[in-house]
Amino acid sequence: MHKGRIVRRAYVEYQPNLQHPQEPIPFGVLAEENSNHERRVVIVGREPKSSVPGLSLDNLWGPFRASITDWIEILDRNVVAALAEIPDSESLVDQLAMQWNANVYIRQPETMELASQRDSLMRYAKRWYGSYVGEPFERRTVKRKPATKTSSSVHRRTAPLWLIREQGFEARA
């Protein structure tokens, strides 16, 4: 019998070239906790918002580009739809991992036993994100300096390469 909380967790990755695979790029974490007739699902990740080296986004357009740059929003919609369809006895993370199998994909989910009853699923997911991506989960705010004119050019601070986002869901049976 389990003493802690049971969670299904999976990592989200991006493979720029399916014909000639290279080292996948870590994007984030999807986690689900299903207990006491409540299902909690969280997504913690990063989305590229400009040319990130190694992503090969320059020649992509439309829905192909959006599947990479807006993957959290797309997965968010899939989670909402799945919450209505998947019975409590089945893992939402497992079902989504079967569907998300293209360039942006969900790795094989794993079961985790959480010792702490106090920490939220979101807090755990942020820690897993930090370990997986290699940098802590921090929402970055960009403070833009006012444009200054020097000769004929305008200098502005560049936008961040990644947008860091989180989403959380709770459903009662």
Image (cartoon, rainbow, N blue to C red):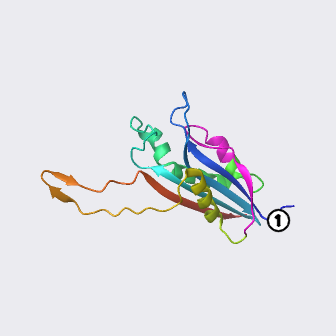
Judged from the image, the secondary structure of the residue bearing numbered disc 1 is loop
Residue bearing mark 1: 3
Q: Is 42 drawn above or below residue 95 in the view shown?
A: below
Horizontal arrangement in the rendering, residue 48 relative to residue 26 (left or right): left
Residue at horizontal 39 percent and vertical 54 percent from the top: 160
Q: Position of residue 133 (x, y in %)?
A: 55, 51
Horizontal arrangement in the rendering, residue 138 relative to residue 122 (left or right): left
Q: Position of residue 118 (x, y in %)?
A: 69, 72
Placement of the N terminus among the 4 image quadrants: bottom right
Does any portion of residue 61 appear in the rendered image? Answer: yes
Q: Residue furthest left?
A: 151
Was residue 100 drawn as part of the magenta stretch in this picture? yes
Q: Is 45 drawn above or below residue 168 in the view shown?
A: above
Does any portion of residue 87 appear in the rendered image? Answer: no
Q: Residue furthest right?
A: 1
- Residue range corresponding to the magenta coloring: 95-116
Q: Position of residue 129 (x, y in %)?
A: 58, 55
The image quadrant that residue 7 belongs to is bottom right
Placement of the C terminus among the 4 image quadrants: bottom right
Question: Identity of the amino acid at label 1?
Answer: Lys
Was residue 150 drawn as part of the magenta stretch in this picture? no
